[in-house]
Image: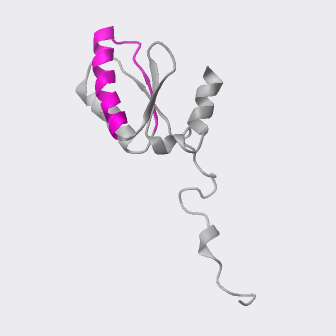
């Protein structure tokens, strides 16, 4: 290995983290306010989870029946992904796949607000 040999590409920054540092799961979190019982909104929320982004969802504007309907469906998606749902308030929930909890940033967020 000489002085002017090629650099090891393993430590080179990628476009993903160039100049920004690594993004944590907390940084990728998306906030949803569910205002009505809508399959389109529910599917959009689930697609966000499946795209490896944690979701903080607020169901305050829904009736208890509509909230339960949507939570049952979303919980099925979370179960399929081997994920976890954390209740942060009466109608505030954090949904994420197992992989998003691994970096610890979501757990830290939960501890900080409780």
Where is residue 78 drawn, in percent x and y? 37, 34
Q: Is residue 35 left or right of residue 85?
A: left
In magenta, the rendered stretch is 54-80
Label total for image: 0
Where is residue 50 drawn, in percent x and y? 36, 42
Q: Quadrant of the N terminus?
A: bottom right
Where is residue 48 drawn, in percent x and y? 38, 39
Q: Is residue 77 left or right of residue 90?
A: left
Residue at left offset 50%, top offset 36%: 29
Question: Residue 66 lies in magenta, yes or no?
Answer: yes
Q: Please state which of residues 114 and 63 is positioned toward the viewer in this rendering.
A: 114
The quarter of the picture where residue 38 lies is: top left
| Residue 42 sits above or below residue 18 on the image | above
| Residue 53 sits above or below residue 68 on the image | below
Q: Is residue 111 left or right of residue 35?
A: right
Q: Is residue 36 visible?
A: no
Residue projecting furthest to the bottom: 2
Residue projecting furthest to the right: 3
| Residue 87 sits above or below residue 90 on the image | below
Identify the image's colour scheme: rainbow, by chain, secondary structure or one colour: one colour
Q: Please state which of residues 82 and 17 is positioned toward the viewer in this rendering.
A: 82
Question: Residue 114 lies in magenta, yes or no?
Answer: no
The main secondary structure of the magenta stretch is helix
Where is residue 7 drawn, in percent x and y? 65, 79
Q: Is residue 11 visible?
A: yes
Q: Is residue 99 left or right of residue 23?
A: left
Residue at left offset 34%, top offset 22%: 71
Residue at left offset 61%, top offset 19%: 114
């Amino acid at each position: 290995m000489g002085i002017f040999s090629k650099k090891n590409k393993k430590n080179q920054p990628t476009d993903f983290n160039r100049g920004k540092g690594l993004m944590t799961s907390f940084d990728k979190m998306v906030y949803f306010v569910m205002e009505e019982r809508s399959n389109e909104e529910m599917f959009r929320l689930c697609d966000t989870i499946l795209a490896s982004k944690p979701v903080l969802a607020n169901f305050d504007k829904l009736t208890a029946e509509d909230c339960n309907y949507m939570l049952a469906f979303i919980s099925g998606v979370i179960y399929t992904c081997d994920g976890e749902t954390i209740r942060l308030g009466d109608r505030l929930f954090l949904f994420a796949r197992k992989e998003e909890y691994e970096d610890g940033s979501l757990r830290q967020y939960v501890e900080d607000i409780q």
